[in-house]
Image (tube, rainbow, N blue to C red):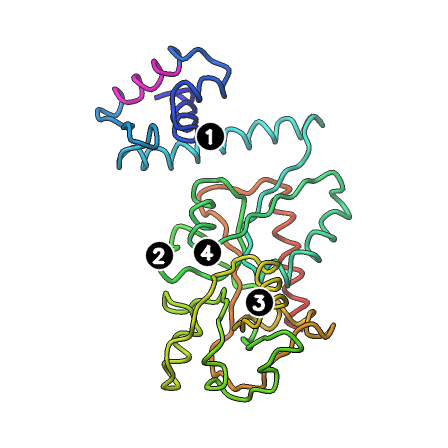
Amino acid sequence: MRNAHLRDLIAVVETGSVRSAARKLGLAQSAVSKNLTALEKSVGVPLLMRSVRGVEPTELGRLVLRRARVVDAELRHLQEEIERFSGQCQNLITVGLSATAEAMLLSEAVARFREYTPDALISVLGGRSSSTIAALREARIDFAVGPLPTDQSVTDLHTEQLCSSDLAIFVRADHPAAGARDLASLASYGWVYSVRQAGEPAIVSLMRKHGLPDPKLVAHCDSSSALVDMLLQSDYVALNSLGALEPLRQRGLLKILPIDLDLPPAVQYLLTPTMRPLTAPAAALAAEFRRASRRLRR
């Protein structure tokens, strides 16, 4: 099993065919096919199968693919660090952030980081914690900041609590229910959400706890900008972390409804791989996320 075999497996799965993978890699199609055959021979079972969507990995193929991506990413990181050491490479850090972490920590962390690393390029990946953690395990991102997933174990990751934020119900400032003081008054409105607890939207369990019908769920928003846009452009209601939307409340765009929720806060964690060291730039950016979170705890 060689690196070229794993590289070609990744390319075929990502492009959907051997021909497209060969074109992407700048290789002959026969060379890619030969590498895939050698890889399957080394593991003793087929790793790929044809479907109406093109070439897809088998169950074992998905397992090998996950590890292959980690190996490929580590080799790229090694090459980047060698080039960075010789001044030939721009610092690139990819992070996965929840909507709350994006709103509460990103701006300050990046601003301070760039004070001493002005040539760095930071790529931000959003999405649910489950998809972010999958990207972290496959080395597609350097680290993540967000809630712990409720549907999987993270014993293979190092978790460090950074900060927390109370939850609140938000509407736009001129919302028809801007004067509501109880959950029953919001039963007819659609809800957008990002906060989940015990595997389901927190607003669902909250409504049930108060003996109310399940809310009308409209959209799950892992992007803070998408959630804000939906609130400002509609009569939707959102249960969200106070820290994420407080700046918009202060500007008079959103309003917090004075409803006692009795819910635990949304906790944000720094998640890093235990078996893979961060590059020096990634470690420096992670340190700035820690610094930004300490300011919030004062």
Front-most of 280 and 202?
202
Name the foreground residue: 231 vs 20.
231
Q: Residue furthest left?
A: 44
Q: What number is the disc on residue 224? A: none
Residue type, mark 3 in image: Cys
The disc label shown at residue 163, or none: 3
Q: Amino acid at mark 1?
A: Asp
Label 1–label 2 contact, CB within 8 A: no
User: Which label sits on residue 129?
Assistant: 4
Whichever of callouts 4 and 2 sits on the residue coming sooner in the sequence is 4
Instruction: Report the residue marked by disc 2.
Output: 152
Q: Quick check: 38 above or below 257?
A: above
Identified by mark 2, the residue type is Gln
* Foreground tag (4 vs 2): 4
* Residue at screen point 65% across, 66% down: 294
Whole-angstrom CA distance, mark 4 to mark 3, is 16 Å
Stretch in magenta: 32-41
How far apart, in angstroms, are the residues tagged by discs 1 and 2? Answer: 25 Å
Q: Quadrant of the C terminus?
A: bottom right
297 to the left or right of 73: right
4 and 1 marks in contact (CB < 8 Å): no
Which residue is found at the position 41% from the left and 18% from the top? 19
